[in-house]
Image: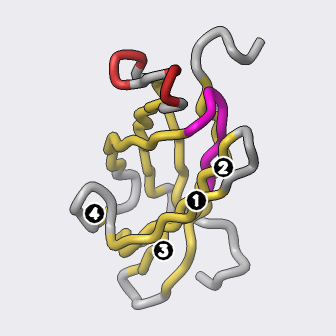
Amino acid sequence: MDKTSASPIKVVALVKHLAEQSDEDDNRYVFSYTITLTNEGDSTVQLLSRHWVITDANSHVQEVRGQGVVGEQPTLRPGQSFEYTSGTVLATPVGTMKGSYQMVAEDGTKFDAPIPQFVLSVPRVLH
């Protein structure tokens, strides 16, 4: 598997606006996101690190890099999924997130699993 081939990792995001933790008067909008990673390939892989690009409605970009996800570096056998929930804070009621997970296959091949862009939005802001 080389870096130009399609990633065997399917990434699905589910977003929730956390109204009780947000403060619109202070331009603080809190969102949680649940990510499900599924290994659709035929070899075991491990998630090593992550890279997020978070953009708010003012085009303010925040990049986040770090080891693993929620303190783990999960290993996924073929057909196996891993789900975790994390969160972010925006200064606007709408924004986007995208990025990639840096993975390694059992044969030592490193590759990026792209995270498709998803929207963070306070309910009733986008129609």
- Secondary structure at badge 3 equals strand
Q: CA distance from mark 1 to mark 3?
A: 18 Å
Q: CA distance from mark 2 to mark 1?
A: 6 Å
Residue located at (40% from left, 22% from top): 18
Q: Which residue is mark 4?
A: 74
Q: Nearer the viewer, mark 3 or mark 2?
A: 2
Q: Which x, y percent locates residue 11? A: 53, 49
Q: Is residue 2 above or below residue 17?
A: below
Q: Which residue is mark 2?
A: 55
Q: Nearer the viewer, mark 4 or mark 1?
A: 1
Q: Quadrant of residue 121?
A: top right
Q: Residue 62: which numbered mark, if any? A: 1
Residue located at (60% from left, 52% from top): 54
Q: Which residue is mark 3?
A: 102
Q: Which residues are magenta?
A: 91-98
The kind of residue on which mark 2 rests is: Thr
The kind of residue on which mark 3 rests is: Gln
Tags 2 and 1 touching, CB below 8 Å: yes
- 116 left or right of 87? right
